[in-house]
Amino acid sequence: MRVTSAILIAIAFALCANAETADKHEGPVVPETPSIPESAAKPDADAKPLPEAVISCYKDIKSAVDEFYALGETMVSLKEGDGYDSIHHGKDSIESHLKSAGVNCCKADTSDFSDDEKLQGVDLITTYSSATDYALVIAQVMKEGITIDAEARSQISEDIESLSKQNDALFSCLVKNSPPAYLKDVQTYESYVQESYKTAKDAFAAKE
């Protein structure tokens, strides 16, 4: 299945529609490119070092972001005969990072964060939300190319459900440990990603 201009246009419209939905919520602007808090990537020698759990939490989320974008690119590049197995490994990698993030982010203590560190953390969450939605939207647009039979459709549904559960576990920790000033923002993106998963689940639901 080769990517045509019509498919690319469909993807663009779908992403724009989801972006309009997100714009209805109050929250920080989603960054155009993946980011990771500078304090986690490049520690300041004069600053108090971040807890190891926080650094691991950030790195796990960033890795999931990268994998979601890579998965989207893989789906767009699907050719006839590739089938679902060619992208299934991407789901496993994402799930691994989300599981690790769920553990580390629950251990994270943000009480001593500076205002800049708190904002950078929220920026990373918005980037994660955008990357998740990006992959799920492309999956829906490309579903006729990757859902080749009932077995593949069932596998995709199971994979989406599995990632959705890991996403819920991650956001549970993020909400619990969010600084009060940014709690509403994090909850907004939690709802946004949950809605993205719901839409994807409905799209790949078994046909009667």
Image (tube, grey):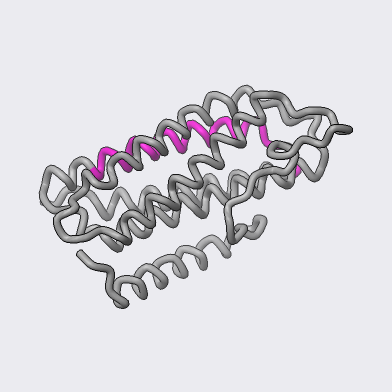
Q: Examine the residues drawn in magenta and state their main secondary structure.
A: helix
Pinpoint residue 77: horizontal percent, then vertical percent: 30, 60
- In the image, residue 32 sits, relative to residue 35, either above or below, namely below
Residue sticking out furthest to the right: 46
Q: Residue at x 46, y 38 (%)?
A: 167
- In the image, residue 25 sits, relative to residue 189, either above or below, namely below
- In the image, residue 186 sits, relative to residue 98, either above or below, namely below
Pinpoint residue 170: horizontal percent, then vertical percent: 52, 33
Most foreground residue, 79 or 175: 79
Q: Residue at x 47, y 33 (%)?
A: 97
Pinpoint residue 208: horizontal percent, then vertical percent: 10, 51
**Residue 36 occupies which quadrant of the picture?**
top right
Is residue 167 one of those drawn in magenta? yes
Count the marks.
0
Pinpoint residue 34: horizontal percent, then vertical percent: 58, 52
Q: Residue at x 47, y 69 (%)?
A: 16
In the picture, measured across the screen, residue 172 lies left or right of residue 1, that is right
If the image is split into quadrants, where does the N terminus sit?
A: bottom left
Most foreground residue, 21 or 15: 15
In the picture, measured across the screen, residue 117 lies left or right of residue 184, that is right
Q: Residue at x 62, y 58 (%)?
A: 31
The residue range painted magenta reads 156-181
